[in-house]
Each structure stands twice: as C-alpha cells, then as structure tokens.
Amino acid sequence: MNHISASVITIGDELLIGQVIDTNSAWVGKALNNIGVWVKHRIAVGDKWDDIWNALEEEQKIADIIIITGGLGPTADDITKPLLNKYFKGNLVTDEAALQNVQQIFSRYNRPMLESNYKQAEVPDTCTVIQNARGTAPGMQFEQDGKLFYSLPGVPYEMQGMMETYILPELKKRFTLSPILHRTMTTCGLGESFLAERIKDFESSLPQNIKLAYLPGATIVRLRLTEQLYENNQSKIDAYFMQLQRLIPEIIITNKDISIAEAIAELLLQKNKTIATAESCTGGYIAHLLTAIPGASKYFYGSVVSYDNTIKENVLNVKKETLEKYSAVSEEVVIEMANNILDIMHVDYSIAVSGILGPEGGTAEKPVGTVWVAVANKSAIKTQKFSFRYNREKNMEATANNAFNLLHLLIKEVS
Amino acid sequence: MNHISASVITIGDELLIGQVIDTNSAWVGKALNNIGVWVKHRIAVGDKWDDIWNALEEEQKIADIIIITGGLGPTADDITKPLLNKYFKGNLVTDEAALQNVQQIFSRYNRPMLESNYKQAEVPDTCTVIQNARGTAPGMQFEQDGKLFYSLPGVPYEMQGMMETYILPELKKRFTLSPILHRTMTTCGLGESFLAERIKDFESSLPQNIKLAYLPGATIVRLRLTEQLYENNQSKIDAYFMQLQRLIPEIIITNKDISIAEAIAELLLQKNKTIATAESCTGGYIAHLLTAIPGASKYFYGSVVSYDNTIKENVLNVKKETLEKYSAVSEEVVIEMANNILDIMHVDYSIAVSGILGPEGGTAEKPVGTVWVAVANKSAIKTQKFSFRYNREKNMEATANNAFNLLHLLIKEVS
C-alpha cells in the first residue's frame, strides 16, 4: 500500500492580489483526501512564465500528483497551455473531440466561433486529453518521471466536473490508497481553550496515528479527528469519536462534517417540520443559509426581512407600542416577530433576530454587536441576548450560528 | 525605489484537506498589493514541523517579506510558536503586555484563566511582539538575513487587525515602495471570448508595464488593468482604462473594483432611492448581498422570501389564478411579485425572482436553470427569462448578478 501525496498549483495574478478567493484548492484538497491522497502543499503563483515553470519543478520533487488549475482560457493572459507544451516537450495539435465540444457549445448559444475558440481545442500531443462537459477548455494529463500532472480550467464548476468524471476514478484505478479518515463535530457555547481543558485527558490518550484539531469559527468550535490508516491497521477512529462526544454532549450541534444550517435542515426533515424566519439585522442571511441547501423547499417556507421598522409593523404585525416602548432591538420585539411569523407563514418553527451589526448604529445603551434572538413554535419560545465584538460580517455569522444553536436546543427539548 | 516581494504561508491541515477555505491569503495579498508590495507566492502547509520549516527556508530564498498565518492557538495542534522559537534561535519568555491583554479578555468574560492561556503570552525573546487587540494570541516580527518575517493568528479578524495597525504602517516606513496600480470593471452580457475579440486591438496596444486580465464569473466578466510603476514613470493606467470603457459602454455595470451589489447600492444612494426584494428561488440571497454592505439601511427596506407558493399568495398577494394558470416560474408571477412588493414595502425599486435552481425540480418544459426575473418601479417594469446551465450554487449567483444587471439598466433608463 502506497502513501500517495499531491500538490495543488493554482495559477492567476488575481489570486495573489486578493481579487479572487481561491476556493479551488480547498475543493481539490477535500476530493483527493476523500480517496486517500494526502495534499502536502498548495501553492499559488501569478500569470508569469518563470514562476509557473519553477512551481512545476519544485512540486514535482515533493509530490506524486500535481494538480494545476487556471490559465486555460481563450485570452492572452492565459499561458498555461503553451507552457505545459514546452515543459512536456510537445507540439500543439487540434483534438477532434475537444473541437466538437467547442462547436456544440457555440451552436447551442447560436454564436459564431472565433479564432481563439478554435485554439481552445488545441492540446500538446504529449498529453492525454480530458474532455470538458461544462465548458470549452479541455483538461490535460501528463506523465513524467513517474509523476502525474493534471491541468484543469480555473472555473470551479468546470474543474470539479473533470475531477469527478476523470481524475478521481483514474487515481483510484492507478494506486492502492491507504485511507485517511476524518470525523468532525461542531460545538457552540464553549471557547477553544476551555474546550481543550475539558478534553485534555482524551487528547493525550489518542494513539499516534489519530490527531485532534480545533477549528474555531464565529462563536463555534469544530473538532476534527484524523486517522491515517496503514496496512493491516484496524480503524479506531469511531470509538474515539464516540468517546469525545460523551465528554461534551451538551454543546454538540452536529457530529457530522456539515454546516449548522445543514444540521438544522436534517433535524427538520427528520421530524417533518417546517420553518420560516423573520430577520432584521441579518437581512436574509439565515434564510439564505437554509435555502442554499438542495431540497430546502421540503422544510423552508419563507422569510420576512424587516430591515426598516415600517416592515416590522406593517408586514410582521409587530405592535407600534412595542416598537416605541422597547425599540427594535429588544426581547419584546423579537418575541412578537417570532410568534407572528409562525402565523403568517403557517410553519412549525421560527427564528427571529434584531440587532446592531455595525459598524454604525450603536448607542451607549445598545453598542454595536447587541443582538436579540428568539426561536419559537406554537407552544414554546426561547430568547437570548448576545453582545458580539466582531466586525459586521463576523457578527452576522455569529448571529446565524447562535440562532441555529438556540433553535436546535428548542427542537431537542420539545421532542 | 525597491521592488519588494512577499510570500504568504498559511498553516493548517484544515486548509489542505479542504475543510476551511483560505480567505486569509487573499486578504493579505490585497492589503500588501495596495501599498506596493508584490505577492509572489502563496503556499499552504499542514500542521507538520518539517513542512513548515521547509516552507520558511524556501520562501526566505525568494521573497523579502514572509507573512505566516495560523497555528498560534492555545491547543496542542498549534506548533507555529515553538517552531519559530527554534528557527530564530530564541527562548520563550512571557510578554507583560500580551499577558495583560489575555487577562483583560478573561476578566471581561468573567472566566478563569487556564495554563494554556498564560502560555499564549509567551513569545521568543528574538522577536518584536505585535499586540493583538482582538484576541489572545500575540503576533511576532522577526528579522534574519535582511528578510522580515511576521507570524499572525489564523483567525481572520485578529490577523486583519494586526496587519492594519502594525504591519502595513511598518512596511511603509521601512521601504520606499514602487506602486502597483489596478483598475477593475465588471461587465455583464458578453462571454469572455467575444469580449476579448472586441477589445483585441486595445489589448495589443497596451504598453509592456500594463497588463489586461479577464476574470470570468457567473455570467459576468471582470476586466482588470494592472500597471507596474517604476521610477520616474508617469502613470498611464487611467487613460487606458477610459479608453477601454469607451469600447464597451453598454455592458459595464461598474467601473470600480466593487461587487455588483455594491454598485447597485451606490446608485440607489446617489439617487436617494429605496429597494425591496421578493425572492423565491434565491431564498434571500439577493437581500443578503444588499445587506452585507455597511449602511444598507439607507436604501434597503426589506424582503419577502416566498419559497412556498402559499407565501406568494398570502404575503405577496400574487393572484391564485395567476399561479394556477402560469405556474410559479413564469413572467406573469414575477411581474405581480415585483409590483406588489413595491406597495407592500413602500419602496422605489423592486427585484423579483422565481426559478428552478436544481438539482431537483426541473421539468421537460421548465428544466433546472430556468429563472424569471422582474425589476420594477412605479412606472416601469423589465422582465427577462434565463436558462442557466450551472449547479445550484452558481445558478443562484448568476440569478443575482443578472437581476442586479437588469435593475441597473432600469435605473439608468428612468434617470
């Protein structure tokens, strides 16, 4: 059984100057890790000939598989293909299947083909072509000195398609891979160092091939166990993962590697319940997190985003007196929001939030970061006040995390 | 004037296995680029002693400044500090200011301090300490062989604070930097290769020190000009940027490096107009994009997310007959949604969307990717039908982009 390692090279000036966040290498890392390939290195270089060339030489020294994304577009700043052609000593030739693919895409959109589009079907004759079912640029596989190289487009959707249909199956065929197992849970309510203190005996009892990692987020901490499984070893990760869960049962939101929104969705589906949200400061973010999940229509009915106070009054039917007496950011207002949205949308559960996320809008009495959350069903309601001290973006994330956590507690209590 | 280059090393297994998307290096890249430091390399390594050590040695060879993020937490998987202590031949000593900071944070939350928290205030005596106003782990600055090293926490909010208050000012003080200028615009409506064809003469007319880059997104393409300015050179980027804008005026949404949502927000603020959204398939995503922007309450009033058809009828007052005759994903329904939300929320402009984003829910007549969009004000309405061919996530992004583009056209027309 081999220990196979990979390097991911992402190409593009936009990655280095921070104009684009690199989601490709995370996706590739996860996909490779799932089949037992350990990603050792990730590197990003600009659209510069020498930098790309050097990266290829360097990564080839340390990894068995080199995945390259980006720089395959039809425009002049895309230099990956000519570079690989030279690096692997080939000649550019037109690939018939790739050309047909480009032609089909253009005829589908009723567009004339340009010279640059014809060129997209050209590939080095030293590569194995990977067809692109989702775009015009074909992928390429090269082999040299016992190393495998894959060049893929930077467009995530196209890159993912080729990984799934060609590269992952190909790697599984070529190598006998020793699995890397992960178990992840998400906790809410205890800071990283207190959590570490509570489970320190557990941590020091772990065998050498199982590692514990802490992944802190906005008021949440994810815990991950990773087991490297060698020949003839029997996996022990599930036993340790169970042990860990028993140490901190009251703060676990989910014992799967899924988002908190996905954990809530699972719970609602399992209990056949529906939900709606009434959001002020989160501005639709909680609804978005729930509807980003495929199949959300089975449990999510809708939301009223009441950013302006007139909407709280006119659409959510919050009493004018309540708003005037307690102001929008108050327990009284989120209680009315949470109860009223249950009636308006005829759902089983609701989340309501009102707060000040910043940077403006804070007062001495209610500083930036003050947030009230209420979660309700027909017979019960839970409320909680928070004082977050992050920036706007992270205050919003922390609000969503804690609203889901509170709802999780309510659902667990009533069932 | 010096040409100063930087490398960014991000540390953490979670980055390599794809559990966390690395937003830090993009942020750091942008911040350094803004002050004229060119990020040459970005590299991610796992929580492994040798890999981190080798990365330091390698990056030190090619860059003047090395920024390291991650691995400074209080738990056992955080090995950056002992490693740097050894790499820079120091001894760990308690930093009084850092200790006070940790103590203050714990007394603020009324929590007892643990041994691991006291340890967070320890630093190598070979570094200059960078205080952390947003968390417990101090940052560190090292100098060796004429190179500068900065070690920062992986938590983005803490890392950003130290970059802004200490590192960026420090670098500006130490180096006379030759500026790197960027100008970015966002276009919608023309594919990358057609756009390239239309501006190819412009592209080949660019001087050597100005580069054009294409950044394609979900049905949008951003165009970026980058100018490297050397001593005594006068900048020409603005003249070229103006020229480029004159070539493709009808497809430009914004000529700034901002999101499309931010461009819409600017336009609304400038014209003193308000907006609301009525969203079905986007599930609050458009409202979220608008409210993620600080100060959104000046133009954004609210949203009704009508995921379930009963909400379209009962809250958005879409006629039962319209829903029955044309079905939810239709021009007739989005017209009613767009017009009705104007009345419900008393706003100047509205966006309404209804569609099938997938992976489930498509039919032969209305396959996955079919989306209707309407944008309206009191006197005009524009509608458009789209047939996207991406996955759920990218279909949602494309819907939002095109809804904003359509609204942009409407606002431009009426004014």
Image (tube, coloured by chain):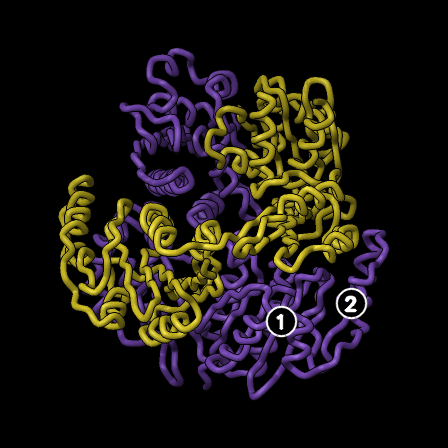
Chain colours: A purple, B yellow
Residue A253 appearing in the image: no
Tell me, for residue A119, which label it has, or none: 2
How far from the left and from the top, in percent, is residue A372? 34, 30
Q: Image check: B112 left or right of B255?
A: left
The residue singled out by tag 1 in the image is: A151
Q: Residue at x 69, y 18 (%)?
A: B378
B166 over B55 or under it: above or below: above
Left or right of B58, for residue B333: right
Q: Tag 2, which chain? A: A
| Residue B104 sits in quarter | top left
- Identified by mark 1, the residue type is Ser
Instruction: Quadrant for residue A94, please give it.
Output: bottom right
Helix, strand or loop under label 1: strand
Q: At 49% from the left edge and 46% from the top edge, which residue is drawn?
A: A269
Where does residue A252 sit, x and y in percent of width and height?
32, 51
User: Could you classify mark 2 by the number of other residues whose Cα lies within 10 Å: few (under 14), some (14-19), or many (20 or more)?
Assistant: some
Up/down of A310 relative to A293, above or below: above
Above or below — where is A210 with respect to A142?
above
Is disc 2 placed on a helix, strand or loop? helix
Which quadrant of the rendered structure holds the C terminus of chain A? top left
